[in-house]
Image (cartoon, helix red, strand yellow):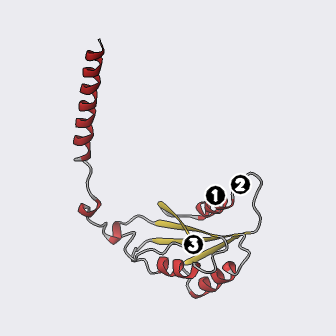
Amino acid sequence: MLFWLGIAILVAYVLIGLEVASGSRKIRFLRDIQPIAPEAAPTVSIIVAARNEERNVRAALRSLLSLDYPRLQLLVVDDRSEDCTGAILEEMASGDSRLEIFHVAELPAGWLGKNHALWQGSRKASGELLLFTDADVVMAPDVLS
């Protein structure tokens, strides 16, 4: 009895392995997919949550501003920062109209700070796709395209 149970389990594993192997061959590699033409690209809203990021926020936002993607909305939510993050964001926004800055002054009961900041940003977003990121992430210019 145990012998036949072992054989049945072995057959099941072989069948599952074949299914996985054949399914993985159907998945295309990202390197094989051609970039979308600029006129057909969906609008992307990038939502950045920033809290006490005065050390990193400039580099991160500069990288977002230098993205080569044609249809982009940049929303930055200052999540109750206690350092100079808010002032840096306002300074950068005054120099580039593509940046939309929002300040969260108070955290509602039952919310976690980052989740609330990203939710606030998503409510302002108009893009077909949303990309959530942190204020210390530096992106390559072609990361979206």
Give the residue number, with chain letter if any, for mark 1.
115
Identify the residue at horizontal 24%, vertical 30% (top origin): 15
Q: Which mark is residue 111?
A: 2
> Residue 124, image x and y in percent?
60, 64
Q: Quarter-wise, where is residue 88 in the image? A: bottom right
What distance separates the C-alpha of mark 1 from that of mark 2?
A: 7 Å
Judge from the rendering whether residue 104 lies leftward or rightward of residue 3; answer left or right. right
- Which residue corresponds to the image point at 72% horizontal and 70% vertical from the top-left? 80
Which residue carries the number 3 mark?
Answer: 135
Q: Amino acid at mark 3?
A: Ala
First in sequence: mark 3 vs mark 2: 2
Q: Residue at x 23, y 61 (%)?
A: 32
Q: Are marks 3 and 1 in contact (CB under 8 Å)?
A: no
Q: Nearer the viewer, residue 40 or 62?
A: 62
Mark 1–mark 2 contact, CB under 8 Å?
yes
Left or right side of 55 for 40: left
Residue 7 image-quadrant placement: top left
- Amino acid on which disc 1 is placed: Asn
SS class of the residue under badge 1?
A: helix
Tell me the tag on residue 49.
none
